[in-house]
Image (cartoon, rainbow, N blue to C red):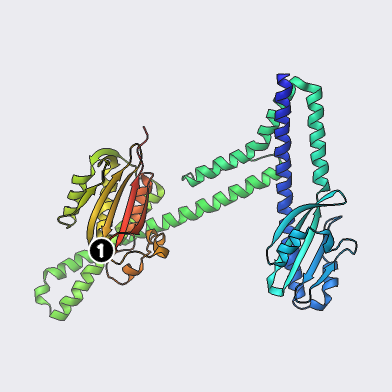
Amino acid sequence: MTGLIAALLLSSASYLTARSYLLQQREEIVERQAFNNAQLIRTQLRTRRSEAFELISGVRTESNGFAVLHLSPEDLYFSQDLLNTQTMLPTELVSATLQGITSRQRFSINGEPFIAMGVSISEINAQYFEAFPLSDEERTLTIIGSTLLVGILVVGSLSSLVGLWVSRRLMKPLERVSAAASEIAEGGLDTRLEHESDPDLSRLVNSFNEMADAVQTRIEREVRFASDVSHELRSPITALAAAVEVLDARRADLSDRTQQALDVVVSQIRRFDQMVLDLLELSRLDVGITEVHREEIDLVPFITRIATRYGVEKIHIDVLQNSDSVIKIDKRRFERIMANLLENARLHGGGVTKIEIESLPHGPTRVSVEDSGPGVTQSERVRIFERFARGSAGRSRAGGTGLGLALVAEHARAHGGSAWVEDATTGGAKFFVEFPEEKT
């Protein structure tokens, strides 16, 4: 009895899975064919509107299916099959499509199952309807159900094993696709699916692998290009910097106008040199050749030392109530994050006004840096962390490479955390960096 009940449950699950899969596949085909036919009608109707009946009659539909065309200004319906007009379609589907909403609905005609698509073609003030029979799917599902029922009655004790095998066989390819997609999202760009003998699954596997190949090739090419360019620029920049230092050492021999020009050259070469260093660092982060070395540190004295090292005196650091400033973190990466946030505040935010540290019990630690600048608009809050992206405040001021906040986001992501910006209560910007608790 237990085996019979288990077999019944597993067979029912297999039937529902097969039904969902078949109907989903059918709905995708229906939607694609309906849109293709609607596109054809739209193209032809632009120049042959008076021949609407001939146009709808020429649409190729499936056996036992039919199509209907409605012209809004004239409020006229043209049916491909005089026996199957718009009156055979679901009222809700017709109403929604006439209101400009592309819809899909299952229904029945004389007991036969159908699925209908209503496509609103607003460009030509028309609506296209097409009905597709589901009798083949219903027969397939009936056969599947009957087979499972017979299998339960005949094999009884073995039905549980058969049902489990069928379920795994149906779900295993999808599970492999999901697992491979997750691995790629986590950085495993070389992840691929194994080839399948089933023709339908083979197409899915091939498409997925081709997509992964294209993504990997593009990312690796871009990373390699940025790294190569950055490396090639180091030598000429070093030579330029050395030559400019020689000129700067003898600036007293130069005229005032020449000294001003020399100051511009010196500042721009230094900015260019910093930009190349940032690009090299980003390229190393992209290929993942730098590791995260965590060690326990107290953030308050560490941030104070970083601020002093980068010329920020008397910095105000708040540790919020019930928060702990001791955290396990990569010191080098955290220093880079804080240095970039301090520099960003100096260049674009009028300087740092406050730094806050907040930690939750068995949760993440957040470090925020407030400034007194104009803030960051809502539309720029995501883009500002992209490479070479600058907010409206950054575009109006000189200095910076456009890579500082991108490095902040990348170093935070290397810790498994994130970076974002909000409005400060004082009116400026408040940049957050979150570090999740290290898993033991």
Q: Position of residue 348 (x, y in %)?
A: 28, 65
Q: Nearer the viewer, residue 413 or 237?
A: 413
Query: Relative to residue 207, is residue 198 drawn left or right?
Result: right
Secondary element at image label 1: loop
- Under mark 1, the amino acid is Ser
Q: Nearer the viewer, residue 162 or 112?
A: 112
Query: Relative to residue 336, is residue 71 drawn left or right?
Result: right
Residue drawn at the location 25% of the way across and 42% of the way down: 325
Disc 1: CA contacts within 10 A as few (<14), some (14-19) or many (>=20): many
Q: Quadrant of the C terminus?
A: top left
Q: How many marks?
A: 1
Q: Quadrant of the N terminus?
A: top right
Q: Position of residue 29 (x, y in %)?
A: 73, 53
Residue drawn at the location 47% of the way across and 54% of the way down: 219
Residue 238 versus residue 3 in the image, above or below: below
Quadrant hosting residue 402: bottom left
Residue drawn at the location 70% of the way across and 48% of the way down: 24
Query: Relative to residue 120, is residue 268 drawn left or right?
Result: left
**Which residue in the protein does label 1 denote?**
372
Quadrant hosting residue 128: bottom right
Q: Is residue 231 visible?
A: no
Q: Position of residue 330 (x, y in %)?
A: 29, 43
Residue 348 versus residue 313 in the image, above or below: below
Q: Is residue 350 visible?
A: yes
